Structure formats: structure tokens, C-alpha cells
Image (cartoon, rainbow, N blue to C red):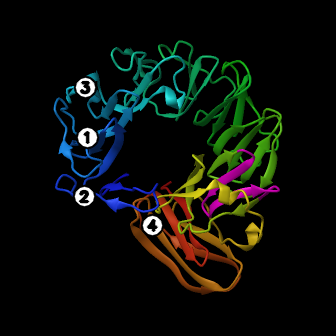
Amino acid sequence: AGTNTGVFRSTNSGLTWTKIFNTLLPGEHISALTANGKNIFAGTNSSFIRSTDNGDSWNVSNQGMPYARCNELVSDDSNLYAVTSGGIFIFTRNDVWKSILAGIINVLFTNDTMLLAGGNFIAGANNSTIYQSIDKGKSWVVDNPGNNFGDFAVLAATIKDNNLFLGTDYLGVLRSTNKGVTWTQENSGLSSLYIHGLVAAGNNLFASTDTAGIFRSSDNGVNWIPINNGLTSKIIYTLIVHDISIWAGTINGVFISTDLGMNWSKLNDTIINSLAFYKKDVFGGTSHGVFKLINGSWTPVNEGLTYLGTSFVATSNGYLFANTAGGGIWRRPLNELSSVTPTVPLTQRLNIVSNYPDPFSTRTTISLSIFKHQYIDLKIFDLLGKEYASVFSGDLNAGDHKFDWDASKFPPGVYIAQIQSEEGIQIQRMVHVIY
């Protein structure tokens, strides 16, 4: 595991971790980490390092690499690739880095991410340049959609019928019918061009937006129609296809459609940041922890989880994984969760927290509901963990409570309201702006 204080190693599948201390890793920020054969490579904020003895010792491995800062390491069956501030490099058999693509590269997509049908690599750069290679970096085809569209950020991607689709931050949907060589905007019918979700199901393509809900296209993006019947919120957090149903996590709860988005049915008011499926089980990551869907209701499965703010959940190799806010990554065996049954209803276990207005310019009201007398500690942090305010600390009776926070003296940005109680730590994301 690469962290902002060096490399850690576990020899028991992640149950315990030991920091690897040596002169080459004195508090280094590890931005990338991967294994290739008997080698372990780490990209730091000042160099590339390599270990050939399972991390016991490390050596600088910068020969042929003029750019020390590493953004990403990608490994396939035989090669190692480094994505740096100066381009993409391949680690050769004689232990020398060789440049295979110059430029300021942000990310490298491979076939594993299903972003390129029938090819190997797509690389995205700062200036909207897209590079494609079908021979693992030996040669590249360069395309610059920015020449036609200006700079943009890619927020989502999917493949359908050999068409590559990109969801962008302000250009809507871009489509390529020739594996990224040329691109066209496909926004007819879209009332919002901020696309942060793209999924394909059958003959249809679905796009979720920031303010306009969900859209569907049955002609590979040429035309879009809104499919928001039954949706009470058009702010979509997550969009996923499972079996014959489409699931949407919104600011007002989770909705399901079994008729290709024509109609949506609401499960409940629980705000789900992400969804994961395992056989017939459904799990949701929330700001209150991890939940399992049982008989139409969400049941908490947070035993042992001390950080409840969960931004992402996933299932793999018999485990459910949860990425928490400030508490790292946690896992739990799925066979433990198969026997979970409803105990106490969700509304009798959680401290429900929200704030209004949001976004806000000077002050906002933080509301929470507790269901028994207990000690509450409410503080405000920024995204880097710096504490800005202690709003309340003390005992509260069961019921609804409201607290005003005056942010007029603080800089605009995203803040976190953190509530610590007997239930654990819960967070609420808040946006402070200046009108």
C-alpha cells in the first residue's frame, strides 16, 4: 500500500500492516505502486524506486527517466508503464526507462477498464488531447478533440456497439466510431451537458447529469430523451445496471427502473453514494456507513467499521470493500453478510444529518436527528482535515436539533460537517460559495 508517508506491507491479506522503513523512504509520498514479475515499483514525489526482495530493500530506478513525478503505474502481463508529468515511459529489459509518449499525461486507460474496444491503450492529457495505441505503446495515434471543443475533463466512459462514449464536464457526450480517432458531440435532447454517469444496457445508452436527471438514447447517442418519470430528484450520484434493472442513487434516495428508464420506483430516502452487487445481494455506501438491502429496506452492516462516511463500495474475491472518508479502506467477508437479517430499523439507529441551504454564501443550518440521549460532537473541517470550527459539544436529548454555522469569515470551498456520537463518525459535505 502506497500512502502519503511511505510504503506499508501486509503478509496476512490486509489484516495487519507494517511500515517499511529505509533510507530511501523517509516520509515519501507514494503516488503509484505496482508489481511486475519479481519487481515492486513505487513512484514517489521525487523519484522512481524498485525492490527485488519483497520490499525489504529499495533502490532508485530513474535511469532514462527525466521526469521524477509519477501520476500512475500500469502493468500488464509483460510490461510496466509509468505515466508522468512528461509523458509515458516503458521499463525495458535492461532496467532502463524508455519514452513511448511525450506530453503532460493525466491517465492511461487499458482494455481492463473497457474504454477501448479492440485496442490496447487510450491516454488522456491536460489539453484535451487523446492518444491511442493498439500495440502497447510502440506507436500512437494522436487526436485532439480540444481543437474542435476546447479543454474538457472526462468524467465517465462506456462502450456500446464498438462506439466509445465519453461523458464530459461541460461538452456533454462525445462519441467516437473509430476507436478515438475522431469525435463528435452527441447532445441532441440533453438539457444538461455535465455528464458524470454513462452505462449501456441492451440497445440503449443511459446518461446521468448533475441537475437534469437521466437521459436515454436508443441510437448510439444521436438523440436523447429525458426519462425522469417518478424521479423526485434530478441530482444523480450513481448510475448502474444490474440484471434487467437500472439503479440510480440520487440526493433524495435510491430509485429503480425495470422498463429501461421509462418509469422509476423509489426504494426509500436513503442517500446512496455508490452501489455494489453480489449475486442477489445489494450493498450501498452512504455517509452513515455500509448497508445491505433486505426486503426493500436498508439494514446497516457496520460492525467493526469505525469510520462511517463511505464514498465507494465494491465486491471482489469474496469480500465487500468500503472506501471511507478519513479512515482508509475496509473489508468484510461476504459470507458473513449473507446471513444478515433486519434488526433495528434504519431510522432508529442513525443520526440523520443535513444542511440548508447548500450551497450557501454566508451561513447554513445543520440539522440532525437522534433517537436516544447521547453525547454529540459537531465540528467543521475542510477536505484536507483542517478543523475550522467547533459548532457543538455536549449531551443532547432524543429528537431533532439544528445548529447555525456562520462561514462568512472563511474562504469559499467544500467543507465537511463531522458528527461524532455513539453510532460512530458521520459526515455531511457542504459547499460554501460567494455570490
Q: Residue at x 74, y 67 (%)?
A: 346
Marks 2, 1: nearer the viewer? 2
Badge number at residue 27 = 2
Residue 336 % position (x, y):
66, 60
Q: Inspect the image, locate mark 3, and give the three-letter code of the amino acid beneath it.
A: Thr
Q: Residue at x 54, y 28 (%)?
A: 114
Magenta stretch encompasses residue 380: no
Residue indicated by mark 1: 69
Q: What is the crowding at mark 1: few (fewer than 14 residues within 10 Å), some, or many (at least 20)? A: many
Secondary structure at badge 3 equals loop
Occupied quadrant, residue 94: top left
Q: What is the crowding at mark 3: few (fewer than 14 residues within 10 Å), some, or many (at least 20)? A: few
Cα distance in 3D space between marks 4 and 1: 29 Å
* Range drawn in magenta: 279-297
Q: Magenta region's main secondary structure? A: strand
Q: Earlier in the sequence, mark 1 or mark 3?
A: 1
Q: Inspect the image, locate mark 4, and give the three-letter code of the amino acid beneath it.
A: Phe
Q: Earlier in the sequence, mark 2 or mark 3?
A: 2
Residue indicated by mark 4: 381
Q: Inspect the image, locate mark 2, and give the three-letter code of the amino acid beneath it.
A: Gly
Secondary structure at badge 2 equals loop
